[in-house]
Amino acid sequence: MLAIKNLSVSYGHKVVLTVPKLNINKGEIIGIMGQSGSGKSTLVNSCLGLVAYKGKIAVNTHDIGVLMQEQHYVDTMTNQKVIEGLLNTRIKSDRKLFDLINFFDFNSQLSLHFKNLSGGQKQRMSLIMLLYQEPTLLFLDEMTTGLDFESRRALIKKLKVYFKEHQTTVIMVTHYAQEIEALADKLLIIHDGQVKAFDQPKKLFQQYIGYSAFIIDNDVTKTVKVQKLEDEYKTVHQLLDDSDDFSRTRSSIELVYTEIMKGNVHG
Ligand SMILES: Nc1ncnc2c1ncn2[C@@H]1O[C@H](COP(=O)(O)OP(=O)(O)OP(=O)(O)O)[C@@H](O)[C@H]1O
Ligand SMILES: [Mg+2]
């Protein structure tokens, strides 16, 4: 679906992103994480042809959808008029649009104006219009930033169902491990303009953590790694004696991310 080779992006004399090779298959959902300024949006913008780059990016479709962090629409009309106008259709005679509006629970917002919607409602309206066009490749840059915990969880749940059903290839930039855990097939970590990891979360966990890990006091920097099942019992006994609170994980993205970044800072 998307193949990158020898990509290099510079602003002025500074190279801000280099990607020797990266392939994304049809139907895969990729979650991109990395510190602020690491090059995540630059990668997305290169794929969209929005910034100048050296190297090759081959995109295998013309049906590309993009959701940026903030959207703006005309504010003199109701949301219904905006949606119908931009999509050139009518809700009551268009089954696909009608279904999407129901799917995203947007009915009661149709008579409002965009500026009066909450952050989550704004994102849902944009997604309705975006998904109506059935993109085969979808870029989401910080889709849930600014949403409260519950709206984020609700939106993720909806999208999970939608993406599965439509086999959409998705590339999403996020600061939320929860989003990756729920949606992504592969995690891409960018640090300082370089790809530090790109694989299935489960594989990255095995590679960087081991069999399992115990997180103490909900603090991923206080972690006991376990390399095999037999060692878990010993660890649990010790933790029961020593700690107030701990949890066991075999998949925490936050932990994987922290571990990979730690390696980079010190290495
Ligand atoms: N138009 C621009 N001109 C000059 N430098 C830029 C421009 N856009 C981005 N940069 C620089 O390129 C680097 C990567 O920026 P990018 O926007 O890709 O980061 P990001 O990972 O998306 O960060 P964030 O999480 O804050 O959105 C940063 O050092 C940034 O300052
Ligand atoms: Mg960005």
Image (cartoon, rainbow, N blue to C red):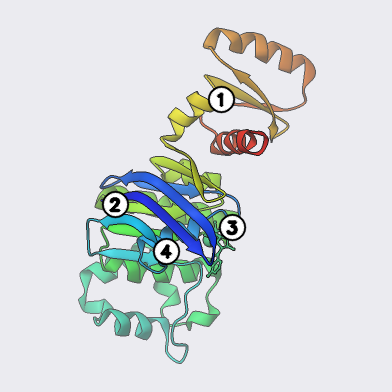
Q: Earlier in the sequence, mark 1 or mark 3?
A: 3
What amino acid type should be assigned to the residue bearing mark 4? Asn
From the image, state whether disc 1 or disc 2 is nearer to you.
Answer: 2
The reply to whether callout 1 and callout 3 are in contact (CB within 8 Å) is no
Q: Is residue 148 above or below residue 133?
A: above
The reply to whether callout 3 and callout 2 are in contact (CB within 8 Å) is no
The residue where tag 1 is placed is 209
Q: Decide if ligand 1 comes within 8 Å of the CB at mark 3.
A: yes
From the image, state whether disc 4 or disc 1 is nearer to you.
Answer: 4
Q: Secondary structure at mark 3?
A: loop
The residue where tag 3 is placed is 37
What amino acid type should be assigned to the residue bearing mark 3? Gly
Residue at 31% in and 85% down: 85
Q: Quadrant of residue 80?
A: bottom left
Local packing at callout 3 (Cα closer than 10 Å; few below 14, some 14-19, many 20+) is: few
Residue 191: percent from left, percent from top: 56, 46
Q: Earlier in the sequence, mark 3 or mark 2?
A: 2
Q: Earlier in the sequence, mark 1 or mark 2?
A: 2
The alpha-carbon separation of the residues under discs 1 and 3 comes to: 26 Å
Residue 91: percent from left, percent from top: 27, 77
Residue at 21% in and 74% down: 94
